[in-house]
């Protein structure tokens, strides 16, 4: 409650004093000295080097004024004259050892230049609480509180105690969340949290089990184009995905299905057999020629609607290739081509898919798509849920028995499979998944802590996890079938977490940065772990798709905010 219009008390356990927001009277300074100080202060704030000379004169005339020496120290620092600033600070500390700004500036110097947090704590007080330094005082000016706790946070961040830094930061937030010092401290803590999170992710990455991959279904390479039953298929080789005329689509869709399917399989075999040829050709292009390398994607679109079980062997051979092959033909959209196709042609061939999942050296991402497909078989027909549960159980058990196989075990893959099983609430699989989890074979950055895994499996199934499939070739191409996907309803826990995030100053600051990134595709770098003594400019860093997401979820950017 306010004691007067500018002096306030705060309901915060670490603020047992009042905070004055207006200018506080100082009986040790004359009206003339106050006038001189006030005249020079805007020049100090602006970092004007022309103010150095009159400030030096003021210090010489009024050695009893610590504020004049502090302003001279600040101006020297802003002008990059650190040696002179250090001499002024040394003199200030000698003449006025109890002057708060002298204490905080010396603490900052010890932390920033010498990394000497022990000496800094001796100056600032072991508990890093302002009231410990001046137990007799009942009122502090807002600038004193802000500067003291800014220095305290810097010290704690240097020590690596982010939790204690956030506790001191809460004092600044309680007094003035919009204050420039509060904002700088917010960014400094957020930067430290990011660094700590990235270090944690790096450690988890080092501890992950990574499968060794290679192409496991090599095809003899050739240059000659195939011959098709239907010349209409040649349109796949002339048009990019977005350019194939609807008339051509209709003509191809009207072809006899048996020979059409044979031609579609031949297109996939062509991509397998002429990969080296097209790869060499593409290296000569000055820009990407989508119309020359979209025939594989066209074939997958048609297989989503017309494919049958006879197509599965060649589709799996596509998935057995190295990741560079898959990226060449499908780019970042591999799943949108492959999943609907597999869902159509593999529903009755779970044993064949099980064998694929047990093969060595296959890309984990290819296996993730197969796992997603099997899960969707249950989503589209819940009568098959026991069959799908047995399928996942056999895969997890096979991996448990071969944990030492570097050509088979990948902890990211097992985590994604566990997520798919969890969304189906297959609680009977928790024992074998827990064994894999305890052995470090399940990536925690993907699936979370064990209690979160259990919660996932115990949560009722949500139809928002059911992925629709195209009903005709038009839907396959324009992907309008995705509009049939149900929206996920937020649980009470989700609502509470969102509300909590809305009140989290670090989350708010992160959202500001993410908003900037949506505007210019770049994320501003955070301030260093301690606020600088002079103004700095922000640099920009672009986020790679495979880098950790800056929202601190622990997931890769492409699997998290990069999808939004």
Image (cartoon, rainbow, N blue to C red):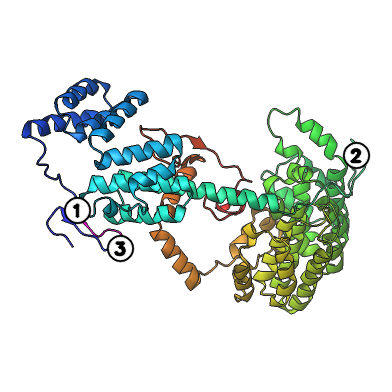
Question: Outermost residue, right direction?
Answer: 220
Task: Say few, some or many: other residues with alpha carbon within 10 Å of mark 1 (under 14 / 14 to 19 / 20 or more).
Answer: few
The range drawn in magenta is 12-17
Q: Residue 302: percent from the left, percent from the top?
A: 76, 55
Instruction: State the residue position of label 2.
Output: 221
Comes first in the chain, label 3 or label 1:
3
Kindly identify the residue that appears in the image at 12 percent across and 42 percent down.
Answer: 26
Q: Which residue is mark 1?
A: 137
Using residue 126 as the reference point, say whether residue 487 is left or right of it.
right
Q: Nearer the viewer, residue 3 or 106?
A: 106
Q: What residue lies at 62% left-to-right and 45% top-to-bottom? A: 545
Q: Secondary structure at mark 1?
A: loop
Specify whether residue 13 is painted magenta. Answer: yes
- Secondary structure predominantly adopted by residues drawn in magenta: loop
Assign the N terminus to one quadrant of the image.
bottom left
- C-alpha separation, residue under disc 3 versus residue under disc 1: 17 Å
Residue 88 location, quadrant = top left
| Mark sitting on residue 13 | 3
Question: For the residues carrying marks 2 and 3, which lies nearer the camera in this image?
Answer: 3
Q: Going from the N terminus, do you reach mark 2 or mark 3 first?
A: 3
> Which x, y percent locates residue 343?
76, 64
User: Which label lies toward us, 3 or 1?
Assistant: 1
């Amino acid at each position: 409650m306010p004691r007067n219009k500018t002096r306030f008390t705060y309901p915060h356990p670490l603020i047992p004093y009042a905070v004055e927001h207006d200018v506080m009277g100082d009986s040790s300074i004359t009206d003339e000295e106050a006038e001189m100080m006030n005249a020079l202060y805007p020049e100090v704030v602006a970092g004007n080097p022309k103010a150095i000379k009159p400030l030096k004169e003021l210090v010489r005339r009024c050695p009893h004024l610590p504020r004049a020496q502090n302003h001279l120290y600040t101006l020297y620092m802003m002008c990059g004259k650190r040696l002179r600033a250090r001499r002024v600070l040394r003199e200030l500390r000698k003449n006025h050892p109890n002057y708060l700004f002298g204490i905080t500036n010396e603490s900052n110097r010890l932390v920033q230049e010498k990394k000497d947090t022990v000496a800094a704590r001796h100056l600032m007080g072991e508990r890093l609480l302002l009231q410990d330094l001046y137990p007799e005082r009942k009122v502090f000016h807002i600038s004193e509180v802000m500067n003291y706790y800014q220095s305290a946070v810097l010290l704690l961040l240097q020590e690596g105690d982010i939790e204690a830094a956030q506790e001191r930061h809460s004092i600044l937030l309680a007094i003035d969340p919009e204050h420039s010092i509060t904002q700088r401290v917010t960014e400094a803590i957020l930067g430290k949290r990011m660094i700590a999170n990235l270090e944690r992710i790096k450690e988890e990455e080092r501890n992950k089990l990574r499968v060794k991959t290679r192409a496991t279904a090599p095809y003899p390479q050739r240059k000659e184009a195939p011959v098709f039953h239907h010349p209409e298929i040649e349109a796949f080789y002339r048009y990019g995905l977005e350019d194939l005329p609807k008339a051509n689509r209709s003509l191809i869709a009207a072809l006899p299905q048996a020979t059409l399917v044979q031609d579609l399989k031949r297109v996939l075999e062509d991509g397998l057999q002429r990969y080296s040829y097209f790869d060499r050709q593409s290296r000569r292009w000055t820009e990407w020629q989508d119309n020359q390398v979209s025939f594989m994607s066209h074939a997958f679109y048609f297989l989503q609607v017309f494919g049958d079980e006879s197509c599965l062997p060649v589709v799996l051979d596509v998935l057995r290739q190295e990741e560079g092959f898959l990226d060449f033909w499908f780019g970042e959209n591999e799943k949108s081509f492959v999943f609907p196709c597999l869902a159509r042609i593999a529903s009755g061939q779970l044993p064949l898919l099980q064998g694929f999942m047990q093969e060595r050296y296959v890309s984990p991402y290819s296996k993730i798509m197969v796992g997603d497909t099997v899960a969707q078989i249950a989503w589209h027909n819940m009568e098959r849920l026991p069959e799908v549960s047995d399928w996942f159980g056999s895969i997890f058990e096979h991996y448990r028995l071969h944990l030492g196989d570097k050509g088979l075990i990948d902890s990211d893959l097992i985590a994604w499979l566990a997520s798919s099983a969890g969304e189906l609430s297959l609680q009977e699989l928790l024992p074998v998944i827990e064994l894999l989890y305890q052995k470090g074979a399940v990536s925690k950055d993907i699936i979370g802590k064990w209690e979160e895994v259990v919660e996932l499996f115990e949560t009722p199934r949500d139809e928002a996890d059911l992925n629709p499939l195209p009903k005709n070739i038009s839907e396959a191409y324009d992907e309008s079938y995705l509009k049939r996907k149900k929206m996920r309803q937020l649980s009470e826990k989700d609502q509470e977490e969102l509300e909590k995030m809305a009140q989290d100053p670090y989350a708010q600051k992160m959202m500001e940065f993410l908003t900037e990134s949506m505007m210019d595709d770049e994320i501003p770098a955070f301030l260093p772990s301690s606020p600088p003594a002079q103004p700095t400019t922000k640099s920009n860093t672009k986020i790679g798709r495979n880098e950790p997401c800056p929202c601190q979820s622990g997931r890769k950017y492409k699997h998290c905010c990069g999808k939004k």
